[in-house]
Image (cartoon, helix red, strand yellow):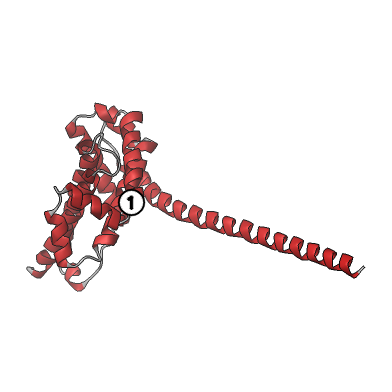
Amino acid sequence: MKSKNKKQSSIYIITLFGILLTTFLIYSCSTDEYNYTNETATEVNSIAKTRSLVSQTWNTGNVLIDSVANSDEFYEFERCSEQLADKFSAYTSKLNNEEYDKLMESLNDDEYMEDFIKKANLEEELRQMDEAKKGLLERTVFLRLSEEERLLLFRQYAKSRELAKRKILKTRKEGNGNSKCEELRQAAYEQAKTEYDNAIATNCKGMGPLSPCYLKETTVYKANIRIANKDYENCINNQ
């Protein structure tokens, strides 16, 4: 009798443990999915704001440009290019001057750049960038655009992007007439973004997602942003 009770007790404990474990796993998976969904929604909302602004300001009168500009593929391309640039910046911000100079000197050194991709953990961002670029080229009329039309497309997006995210710091100097310096910086940002997107779309064809080409263009882009910020500081100090 005692043996039978012990056996029933063991079965009860095992069953209870199984129920608790299942409940924990379900909660854990639901939490992960919730966090992932929230992160994705935040990212999509950022692009959506720019997309809304573009639609309000877009007035090229060019059917081909407007077709690309209003496509999901174009905004996926932009999301991935910004994601890649942001991840790159997060890593390079931790480099000292010597390490950063080494990066700039090694843009044409494929072995160095491939090693850099691994150190910066950029593989997934590069794969997404490559897939988004393929979508832009294969499922829109992007390839029918002339070079001038491509630049107009990317310039219009860059301008709308800066308007959507601009948060000008109101300093005393800024209030004393340095808005011209800010205008010059915003123009430099727009030009850098335009050249970056155009280079990603046209210079890195058929090279594979982990090709140093994407990283090289990202490095040049962020270097131009650094120059724009430095020129801005010089502009303010010289007034």
Q: Quadrant of residue 180?
A: bottom left
Q: Amino acid at mark 1?
A: Gln
Q: Is residue 35 left or right of residue 76?
A: right
Quadrant in which the C terminus is drawn: bottom left
Task: Evaluate whether residue 180 shows in this view.
Answer: no
Residue most toward the right? 1
Residue most toward the bottom? 172
Provide residue 51's location: percent of width, then percent of height.
36, 44
Give the secondary structure at mark 1: helix
Residue underneath mark 1: 83
Q: Does residue 238 lie above or below 213 as drawn?
A: below
Provide residue 149's location: percent of width, then percent of height.
21, 33
Out of 184 and 16, give the one closest to the viewer. 16
Provide residue 111's location: percent of width, then percent of height.
19, 49
Q: Quadrant of residue 10?
A: bottom right
Q: Quadrant of residue 29?
A: bottom right
Which residue does the image show at 25% across and 68% down from the upper left? 170
Which residue does the image show at 41% across and 52% down from the upper left? 43
Which residue does the image show at 17% across and 56% down from the upper left? 223
